[in-house]
Amino acid sequence: MRIETAKAIIRQHQEAAPVHVIPLAEQLGVPVFYVDWPEDVSGMIKRADDEHYAIYVNENHHSHRRRFTMAHECAHYILHRDAIGDGIYDDALYRSGLPNKMEYEANRMAADILMPHHLISEALDNGLDSIQSLAELFQVSQSAMSIRMGVPYES
Ligand SMILES: [Zn+2]
């Protein structure tokens, strides 16, 4: 799948917040499965057969975290398929053994998937202006939304 095709599919799933990541991943051709993992593993993308990959997500993480992990693994699938070989694990800090640049790109695309600028503008136009209310609408963590909005995060 070409990156342009993947981006077109992503846009189809960004008509309203929150973006539903599982149907998006499925349309990209990567089904999502939950796994009972220890806290320090976020997710995995793994080759299922010659042509297909699947995403595995830590079922013990908060739903907002799981959504970010799914989007991050989708990004690896779209951007880094040649580098992931038979599969990679992402730890709690989204380190997988891939170069940091690729993790940065995957985090960046995950944010673009879950918090597209056009839907954030719409939410702001509708009067939502706190990190908390935006995070709730987009079903992301307040820290992820803070980073997206370029404001310091205070937990
Ligand atoms: Zn990663």
Image: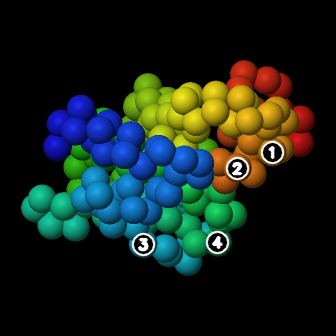
Mark 1–mark 2 distance (CA, rounded to whole Å): 6 Å
Give the residue pinned by disc 3.
33
The answer to whether mark 1 and mark 2 are in CB contact below 8 A is yes
Please name the residue shown 84% across and 36% down the image: 130
Which residue is outermost to the bottom? 36
Which numbered dot is residue 133?
A: 1
Task: Say if residue 111 shows up in the picture.
Answer: yes
Mark 2–mark 3 distance (CA, rounded to whole Å): 24 Å
- Mark 1 or mark 3: which comes first in sequence? 3
* Residue 154 picture location, percent across and down: 89, 35
Callout 4 crowding tier (Cα within 10 Å): few <14, some 14–19, many ≥20: some
Which residue is outermost to the front? 126
- Secondary structure category for the residue under label 3: strand
Task: Say if residue 143 shows up in the picture.
Answer: no
- Mark 4 or mark 3: which comes first in sequence? 3
* Residue 132 picture location, percent across and down: 83, 44
- Mark 2 or mark 4: which comes first in sequence? 4
Q: Given the image, on which type of amino acid does mark 3 rest?
A: Phe
Callout 2 crowding tier (Cα within 10 Å): few <14, some 14–19, many ≥20: some
- Secondary structure category for the residue under label 2: helix
Query: Is label 1 or label 3 in front?
Result: 1
Mark 4–mark 3 distance (CA, rounded to whole Å): 12 Å
Q: Given the image, on which type of amino acid does mark 1 rest?
A: Ser
Image side of residue 68 versus residue 136, left or right? left
- Mark 2 or mark 3: which comes first in sequence? 3
Please name the residue shown 73% across and 30% down the image: 124
